[in-house]
Amino acid sequence: MPAFTATAPGKIILFGEHAVVYGRPAIAAPVEQVRARAVVNAEPRQPAGHMRILAPDIHLDAALEELPDEHPLAKVVLEVMAELDVSHLPACTLRVTSNIPVASGLGSGAAVSVAVIRALAAFLGSSLPKERVSALVYEVEKIHHGTPSGIDNTVITYDMPVYFVRGQAMQTLRLAAPFTIVIGDTGVKSPTALAVGEVRRGWEADPQRYEGIFDAIAEISRQARMSIEDGTPEILGALMNDNHAFLQQIGVSSLELDRLVDAARRAGALGAKLSGGGRGGNMIALAEADTAQVVAQALLVGGAQRTIVTQVA
């Protein structure tokens, strides 16, 4: 019996992180240079119902029944079984690998879930529609993020740039012209749930101030969408700078992120900001295609652990 394999990309949030949790729009795009991969193999010599889960990146080698139901990998398997009305799996091995940095804002958890869902569904003789894949991933995202906005599971499942408003139908972006983004990883792991929780406490303490900031970020996201769809992506740089300033005001930037943002701007980036939950993880910079490598090198000199140059197209 052949192996059943699926992969899923990482993602970056271009505009609107944190505000998106409070009903404002955000823009995100897939990052194809990093991917999660899931492979399911039948194990006919093992008893029916047995699944061995291998995830060498997190040093996991366990049977499904040995994991708590709220373990992200167990959760995603159980979600697929429930969706397909499967009570007992054929004996199999699930192997999960990923080169997406964990807790860095690149959507590693959602990408793993998407890959596992698609590989396991194929192994079980089914193909789930994208809206169901995204919905199942969202359930797993609650483990990773507490109160996820839904943007990670959406952009990674559909594998295209999206304009996302929580609770509304997904809107894909029509790009009139491609643009280049340089991603810089601070190397500081920062679980999104922690940053989201801190913003929640700030909002509860001073809702008027935070709502004003979220409204301002929403307007930036709307202007960015017009720029992207009008074919004037150079305008995005100044919008990124403004978005970063608002994220600094709600306390989700960090010394490491600010250092890389400044390094990118000094190297000629048109604009730069943190991307994702903040407090570590990644930042992004808008660069001309012919200067992107210069910006990437400046980020490495400035302390980035790694960089990725990607095109949003």
Image (tube, rainbow, N blue to C red):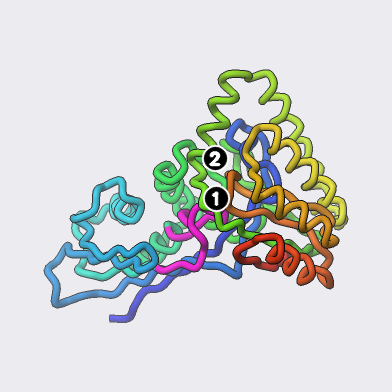
Image coords of residue 198 (percent x, y): 54, 32
Does the stretch in magenta take in 106? yes
Image quadrant containing the N terminus: bottom left
Name the spot of residue 293 as percent of width and height, x first.
76, 71
Near mark 1 (Cα within 10 A), the count class, few <14, some 14-19 or many ≥20, is many
- Give x and y (percent) for residue 247: 69, 38
Taking the spot 48% from the left edge, 36% from the top edge, the residue there is 147
Pick the residue in front: 147 or 307: 307
- Quarter where residue 220 is shown: top right
Give the amino acid type for the residue marked by disc 2 in the picture: Ser
**Does residue 117 lie above or below 224 as drawn?**
below
Task: Give the left or right position of residue 23, taking residue 50 as reference.
Answer: right
Q: Is residue 126 visible?
A: no
- Which residue in the protein does label 2 denote? 149
Horizontal side, residue 254 vs residue 54: left or right = right
What numbered label is drawn on residue 152? Answer: 1
Q: Give the magenta range.
A: 97-112
Query: Which quadrant holds the C terminus?
Result: bottom right
Q: How many marks?
A: 2
Q: Residue at x 46, y 46 (%)?
A: 138
Q: CA distance from mark 1 to mark 2?
A: 8 Å
41 left or right, relative to 240: left
Above/below status of 289 relative to 165: below
The reply to whether the magenta stretch includes residue 131 is no
Marks 1 and 2 in Cβ contact (< 8 Å) = yes
- Residue type, numbered disc 1: Asp
Instruction: Describe residue 52's horizontal placement relative to residue 7 as left or right.
Output: left
Classed neighbour count for the residue bearing mark 2: other residues with Cα under 10 Å, few (<14), some (14–19), many (≥20)? many
